[in-house]
Image (tube, rainbow, N blue to C red):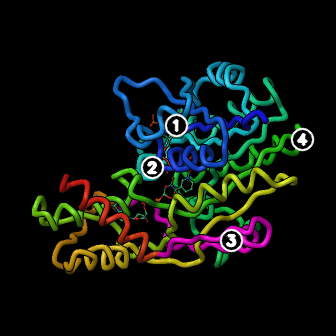
Amino acid sequence: MAKSRALITGITGQDGSYLAEFLLAQGYEVFGMIRRSSTVNFERITHIQDKISLVTGDLLDEVSMINVLKQTKPREVYNLAAQSFVQTSWSQPVFTGETTALGVTRLLDAIRTVDPEIRFYQASSSEMFGRVLEVPQNEATPFYPRSPYGVAKVYGHWITVNYRESHQMHAISGILFNHESPRRGLEFVTRKISNGVARIKLGLESTLALGNLEAQRDWGFAGDYVKAMWLMLQQDAAEDFVISTGETHSVREFCEVAFSVVGLNWQDHVVVDEAFIRPAEVDFLVGDSSKAQRLLGWKAEVEFPALVEMMVRHDLESLRN
Ligand code: NAP
Ligand code: F7E
């Protein structure tokens, strides 16, 4: 039987690399869309590069995506590409909108043009809930985004719903809460902490500068979350799902656990630097993913302390080598 073909945008990112691994294990032929860059940034996919095919395209250029779709002929498209760092969205709000919001329309329209039967997954985000209007947040919770990134994701979310309703496309959104891993970008708070802890333990630094320690997030493991993306696209009905652990922890708690993994006290090393405080904060997030549990049989496997420990141990190991 012919293999199923999937196209992943954002394959060089954290989620793209885990999703590619997962789809390969399911027997898929995996294509990854990459954008042109002057230096190679394949470190998250080097280990699987001989098993996947990379094609060049950009969310800012619809024609490039039409060509990618014609070339790869996928049955499923996972749109994981985005300007995904919330802090940067204040300094580059237009670029964030072009990529994270309008990029979704360009890709949906390219699919409608080339093959409207393609199933489409949009990487929606808990940042859309922003200043939360309900606790916990589920698929029916209204959005109140707090950053240009969150606003752009709300647009991406609703244009996906709109293409589903206007053009009868199998287009869905996964509203994913924060998910982390040893492959998380170094600018995000969890990896910044795990990497900082490892550097301090090895005597390379003595302090770690952070912003708001009281922000609370529902943090899961990225490897668990990509399975949910796939499960969503296998459903007969095109529906949106919240994916979360159902537990929330503060940045302060993340620090406590991370420093304790290497026998250090976080209070001896963490300093607050105003530069990392955001113009508007998302103070508290906790998701209700009971719909995913009921209809997809999905639940988060890796728990908070194990996630923190996994990240710290990985950073210690890689800095030692
Ligand atoms: P990430 O590590 O920042 O990866 C983003 C990917 O998008 C990279 O491969 C990047 O390519 C690519 N990209 C950026 N701009 C592009 C453009 N104009 N054209 C083509 N590709 C472009 O993000 P992630 O954590 O894996 O997240 C994946 C998706 O889920 C994102 O849409 C994010 O907003 C969303 N999301 C993430 C979380 C989370 O907690 N991780 C939660 C909810 C939603 P380069 O390598 O070339 O930069
Ligand atoms: O911040 C606080 C910060 O940048 C988490 C993206 O994947 O998840 C991610 O967005 C919290 C915020 O992630 C620092 O103020 C304190 O309250 O790790 P983050 P994020 O903004 O939650 C969502 C679901 C996405 O969709 C996004 O794409 O931590 N914080 N001190 C800090 N944050 C950072 N980055 N650096 C600090 O020093």
Dot 1 or dot 4: first in sequence order is 1
Q: Amino acid at mark 4?
A: Gln
Is 135 above or below relative to 16?
A: below
SS at badge 3: loop
> At x 52% / y 54%, what residue is drawn?
147
- How would you classify the magenta stretch by its main secondary structure? loop
CA separation in Å, label 2 and label 4: 32 Å
Q: Amino acid at mark 2?
A: Phe
Residue 84, x across and y down, in percent:
49, 47
Classify 10 Å Cα crowding around label 4: few (below 14), some (14-19), many (20 and above).
some
Q: Which mark is residue 168?
A: 4
Q: Is residue 281 magenta?
A: yes
Q: Which mark is residue 289?
A: 3
What residue is shown with label 1?
A: 94
Q: Magenta part of the protein: which range?
A: 277-303
Q: Nearer the viewer, mark 1 or mark 4?
A: 4
Q: Nearer the viewer, mark 3 or mark 2?
A: 3
> At x 70% / y 46%, what residue is drawn?
121
| Residue 148 visible from this viewpoint | no
Is 69 above or below relative to 262?
A: above
CA separation in Å, label 3 and label 4: 26 Å
Task: Please say if the residues under marks 1 and 3 sit with CB atoms less than 8 Å apart.
Answer: no
Q: Amino acid at mark 1?
A: Val
Classify 10 Å Cα crowding around label 2: few (below 14), some (14-19), many (20 and above).
few
Residue 216, x across and y down, in percent:
47, 74
Pick whichever, 147 or 158, lies toward us.
Answer: 158
- Say whether mark 1 is within 8 Å of ligand 1: no
